[in-house]
Amino acid sequence: MSARLVLRLVVIALAGILLSAVPAYAYSNAFFHTQSSGNRGTDVLAIQHLLTANGQSTPADGVFGAATVTAVKAFQTAKGLGVDGIVGPQTWAALTPQIQQGASGPAVRALQVELNAKRRLNLAVDGVFDAEVTAAVKAFQTHAGIGSDGIAGPVTWRNLVWHYDYPTFEPGLCDQNPDGNGNANWGTAALVGQLEAAARAFAATGHGKVPLGDAGFEHGGDIPGHASHDVGMDVDIWPIRTDGAQCTAGRITWQSSTYDRAQTRALVNAIRAAAPGHVKLVFFNDPVLIQEGRTVHWDGHDNHLHVRYCEAVHPNSLYDC
């Protein structure tokens, strides 16, 4: 049996246990998002801090690059885990310690960056588990419907890692709500980190910001007007205009006179470059981009690009890389 298949079975089994054996709370389907080479975002940054806490120092840049792969493999070897350089549920569980007020060090930094991203806080990332961090942990636990004791243990870590992230709109993104789903900007930490990086890279070319349509709700679930976007790994963005005014002048289709194919192509390239191996598909009906293999046709996608990200292993096979 391959290591990938074993990892998939572990993820699915854990998801099933969570659905059947824990109390009903805000996200009873919580699981550790699998992170691997090419991923970006808060969860990767937390992993890097946790690796350092476990004696495997790696740059804390939020990018799952070669140094992080090496550190993960060394950690897995030390812990007697399967050595694949992928942070799945078993590796996450081994990385995350039980910590509480009075603790200090890189593991606390991991907790602080997770709380800041998932609860939109501004905790100092100083590695000190003080009264303010305790209050933030208790508030998160109440939010999640789990025991509110201020101690970051296995259940708290799993729910915190699972919880969706919210993008920073500066400098590369602008917020658009064409379907009236104004709070549907949430996504997994990987989606948010990877999209932000792509948007920054594109905005630096001088052709305007990237308009963010709908991603997901804070805890997932159905979004009116969408058949997917349920698991925090799908996001809609708008094509680029020749005047660079896609954030202010309204949405267009690939057939519009103001549609800029070259810059929309550049945007798709930036999206893929920011998340190598973690872009499952891009729906968009420009026939030239389809012919080039950059996008895929899907009815209803003349006026927006639907980006689907993926993980090395996910409980839903639609989101497997």
Image (tube, rainbow, N blue to C red):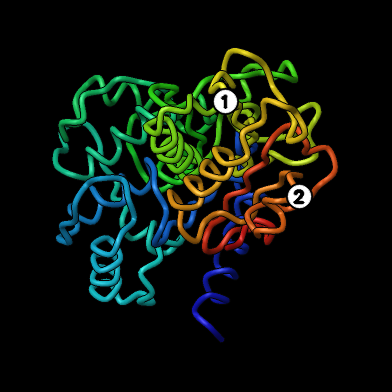
Q: In the rendered structure, which amino acid carries the disc numbered 2?
A: Pro
Residue 287 tag number:
2
Q: In the rendered structure, which amino acid carries the disc numbered 1?
A: Pro
208 left or right of 99 in image: right
Q: Is residue 216 visible?
A: no
| Quarter where residue 292 is shown | bottom right
Q: Position of residue 182 (x, y in %)?
A: 64, 16
Q: Position of residue 153 (x, y in %)?
A: 36, 44
Please tell me which residue is depicted at 42% across the width and 64% down the height of the picture: 90
- Specify the farthest residue to the bottom: 1
Q: Could you say whether the residue bearing mark 1 is in a helix, strand or loop? A: strand
Q: Which residue is mark 1?
A: 211
Q: Position of residue 318 (x, y in %)?
A: 69, 57
Q: Could you say whether the residue bearing mark 2 is in a helix, strand or loop? A: helix
Crowding around mark 1 (Cα neighbors within 10 Å: few <14, some 14 to 19, many 20+) is many
Please tell me which residue is depicted at 61% across the width and 61% down the height of the picture: 320
Alpha carbon separation for disc pair 2 and 1: 22 Å
146 left or right of 39 in image: right
